[in-house]
């Protein structure tokens, strides 16, 4: 055992700031931590934009803030007194994700799982009475990055009626294609005027006529640069065709491919509420014809995005805008999807038109 005489003396430092943070003359560590600039070097100017590389871009910061706001949003119990405390002791903390609509057949909520605490998106179908859930069980097997996954389904009387609740993955800060590109959510004034609805039977003499307004609005969109870049269109179409390929391969049909059902989160495109149509209309359906209708719906969606308007009734004027603004491959793709004759169409037939653009979306 070491004797007390052989131990090193203990030095007590005086109170105050630590020695290594003091002036250079008081500690040998200070010169290592706060070394001054060498005398032989003059002032150096930093490269332009170098400071921005050390900080998070504003776009990423705002996206994170928006996601956190969506995840941690709490509902006011006095504003929604009709909401139940929980659903079948499985999901609680219900928060409406959309404004109430009179006589709506479906309502969307965000809820937390009672055991795991994970958030889910719930699609409530009002007045549900049938129990044919065979196709819903098939939808639960679809696991694709461009399809909002159906996790579960159950019936409940918690809303004082017979309702079916479809449980989906929750993707915060998602926005529909309608709100992002076609209804002025992120568009400029030209696109807003292009997308606005005008009654063709209006008695107002100053109301624009449908064809004239549509054509002039398209020309204004081209002049103002409101059209989407072609790379954005191909990105959306490639992801949607990949989702349809997975759905059709499983013997199912989307049946709800429209701008209000396609959501975007960053650059990721997803088809939402898959299976809800099958729950509302559980009767037998011609899957082959329904899959053909999916391709036609994809063509209408592509044409609406290319023209930046949902008013594409005049196909000749719309395709003229597409041919003057985009490549021949995109034009041929839209024409192929919108064609209803010429035999059965398939998603795999689109690959020659997509070409090498497919690999730019592989992540």
Image (cartoon, rainbow, N blue to C red):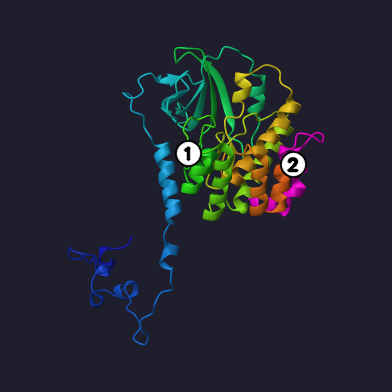
Q: Position of residue 183 (x, y in %)?
A: 50, 40
| Relative side of 192 to 142, left or right | left
> How many residues crowd around disc 1 within 10 Å: few (fewer than 14), some, or many (20 or more)?
some
Q: Position of residue 260 (x, y in %)?
A: 55, 34
Closer to the camera in the image, 178 or 53: 178
> How many residues crowd around disc 2 within 10 Å: few (fewer than 14), some, or many (20 or more)?
some
Q: Which numbered disc covers residue 172?
A: 1
Closer to the camera in the image, 348 or 215: 215
C-alpha separation, residue under disc 1 versus residue under disc 2: 34 Å
Please report whichever mark, 1 or 2, sits nearer to the chain's N-terminal start. 1
Vertical relation: 357 (above or below) 177: below
Q: Position of residue 180 (x, y in %)?
A: 51, 43
- Quarter of the view holding residue 30: bottom left
> Start and end of the magenta stretch?
336-363
Secondary structure of the residue carrying numbered label 1: loop
Q: Which numbered disc covers residue 336?
A: 2
Eye-nearest disc, 1 or 2 = 2
């Amino acid at each position: 055992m070491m004797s007390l005489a052989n131990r090193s003396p203990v030095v007590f430092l005086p109170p105050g700031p630590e020695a290594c943070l003091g002036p250079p003359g008081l500690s040998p560590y200070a010169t290592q931590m706060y070394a001054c600039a060498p005398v032989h070097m003059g002032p150096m100017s930093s490269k332009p934009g170098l400071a921005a590389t050390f900080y998070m871009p504003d776009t990423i910061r705002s996206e994170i803030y928006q996601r956190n706001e969506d995840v941690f949003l709490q509902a006011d119990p006095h504003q929604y007194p009709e909401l139940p405390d929980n659903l079948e002791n499985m999901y609680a903390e219900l928060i409406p994700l959309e404004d109430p609509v009179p006589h709506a057949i479906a309502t969307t909520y965000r809820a937390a799982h009672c055991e795991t605490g994970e958030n889910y998106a719930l699609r409530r179908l009002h007045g549900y009475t049938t129990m044919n859930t065979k196709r819903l069980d098939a939808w639960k097997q679809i696991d694709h990055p461009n399809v909002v996954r159906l996790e579960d389904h159950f019936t409940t009387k918690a809303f004082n009626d017979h309702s079916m609740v479809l449980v989906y993955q929750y993707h915060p800060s998602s926005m529909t294609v309608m709100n992002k590109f076609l209804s002025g959510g992120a568009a400029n004034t030209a696109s807003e005027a292009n997308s606005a609805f005008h009654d063709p039977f209006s008695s107002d003499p100053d109301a624009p006529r449908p064809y004239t307004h549509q054509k002039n609005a398209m020309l204004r969109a081209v002049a103002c640069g409101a059209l989407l870049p072609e790379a954005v269109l191909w990105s959306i179409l490639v992801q949607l065709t990949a989702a349809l390929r997975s759905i059709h391969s499983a013997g199912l049909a989307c049946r709800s491919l429209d701008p209000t059902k396609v959501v975007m989160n960053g650059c990721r495109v997803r088809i939402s509420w898959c299976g809800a149509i099958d729950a509302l209309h559980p009767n037998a359906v011609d899957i082959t014809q329904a899959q053909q209708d999916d391709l036609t719906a994809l063509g209408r969606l592509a044409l609406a995005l290319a023209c930046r308007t949902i008013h594409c009734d005049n196909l000749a004027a719309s395709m003229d805008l597409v041919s003057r603004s985009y490549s021949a491959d995109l034009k041929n793709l839209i024409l192929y999807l919108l064609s209803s004759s010429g035999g059965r169409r398939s998603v795999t037939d689109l690959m020659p038109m997509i070409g090498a653009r497919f690999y730019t979306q592989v992540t």
